[in-house]
Amino acid sequence: MHSQQYNKSLLSGERHHPSTSTLRFSASRQPHPAMASTVAFPPAIAVGANVQHSRRTSSLRPVPRARPVAARASAERDGAAAAVQARSGRTIEECEADAVAGKFPAAPPPTRPQAPSGTPEIRPLDMAKRPRRNRRSPALRAAFQETSITPANLVLPLFIHEGEEDTPIGAMPGCFRLGWRHGLLEEVYKSRDVGVNSFVLFPKVPDGLKTQTGDEAYNDNGLVPRTIRLLKDKYPDIVIYTDVALDPYSSDGHDGIVREDGVIMNDETVHQLCKQAVSQARAGADVISPSDMMDGRVGAIRAALDAEGFHDVSIMSYTAKYASSFYGPFREALDSNPRFGDKKTYQMNPANYREALIETAADEAEGADILLVKPGLPYLDIIRLLRDNSALPIAAYQVSGEYSMIKAGGVLKMVDEEKVMMESLLCLRRAGADIILTYFARQAANVLCGTKRM
């Protein structure tokens, strides 16, 4: 009988959709209500109805009915239908004739909400423009929203170590030093499940491997290269960003080689960074991210990568990295605090704005593919400055201090953690960031996907 119906539909010009008519959702993976209204059904299938419409005959005939689907659009339509009077069965011509004769069917009268008692009676302001008109309903606000954010805009920083157990980071609730063979793979799996496919790696290097020149940074069998190879073997489609700097590998805790008088040596450090970048590219890194702030390192790294045949490996330069106090929790996570002094001779002064243009021009000229601003939320003006002065993609790093403050405020019930998290990320996007490095990446993606999985 099914084949007969299928043959008839072919003769009548109908399109048959056997797969759609038997649509099923498993009990464990029900579609989320937020997604239900966007499900696309073929034209011949009326959602929630047990009929099929023929384009040629305008007739209705039964088709096999699928198991009921819990869809918001269907529920809303059923509710609206219940409030509408039953059809009279009259033809279109009869209804039009009544309208021409002025016999209009009854419709609900217009309503005007009443103001509360005591509201003064005034003459309305003489205003042609009232911006609130475009904000008066959720549908209008959504239609005119200028900035959006998706999981594709998020990059998740991951701390890794040699151990097998995941170690919580006290200053960063919800973050861990992940065992590179176990916990890391699980975290990446969960993140991919909600649409986060980009990750940046930060290693906790054993003290015994740290030296003043940071030679462990370019060990092809070091923690980072091993991790890259493992991740690319398990998840070849993900994007792996790597950090290029000497501080995790330096016994002095600085991003470069320290001379005996405390000066950070620029050109000698760049030499080491080039070897580190090539080692990471050789392991399979997609994007090399120099965060050291040495002069000329982008051009030198580009030349080193190209010389080794890694023309397709991108460079995301930490273009405007400020000497900020917001990095404290991160340095605890990697145990990479400077043994002496600070980083003000190579990281930017938080008081400076125009200087970011100098760094932008240099990085663009030297071959950077992406420009990054760090920290994020306190430096929205710098993000906008780079966005307005460069055609390259702009990245923002919502750093550990920003993350921990939002977490602490949520724990103390001072703010709504989820709402502040999402607002802060949206602000970074609005300022001009194309991608955001954030420890909230998976948590925010859960919200964007309409789930609460952790």
Image: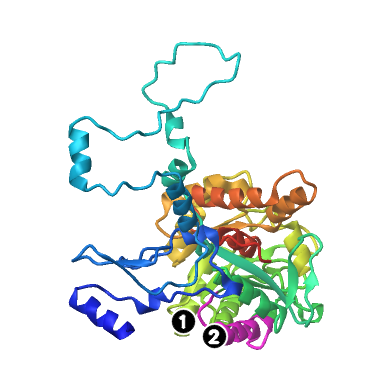
According to the image, label 2 marks what residue?
282
Is 280 magenta? The answer is no
Say which label, 2 or 1, has the lower sequence index: 2
Identity, as a three-letter code, of the amino acid under mark 2:
Arg
Part of the protein shown in magenta: 219-239
Q: Looking at the rendering, which quadrant does residue 171 occupy?
A: bottom right
Q: Height in image: 343 above or below 99? A: below
Nearer the observer, 60 or 283: 60
Residue under the image location 18 percent in, 78 percent down: 11
Q: Height in image: 302 above or below 234? A: above
How many marks on residues?
2
What percent of the width, then of the height, locates residue 430? Answer: 50, 48
What percent of the width, then of the height, locates residue 61? Answer: 30, 69
Q: Alpha carbon of mark 2 to alpha carbon of mark 1: how far?
A: 8 Å
According to the image, label 1 marks what residue?
310
The answer to whether the residue labelled 2 contacts the one labelled 1, judged by CB atoms less than 8 Å apart, is yes
- Taking the image as drawn, is residue 435 in sight? no
Could you tell whether 206 is left or right of 230 in the image? Answer: right
Which quarter of the figure is the C terminus placed in? bottom right
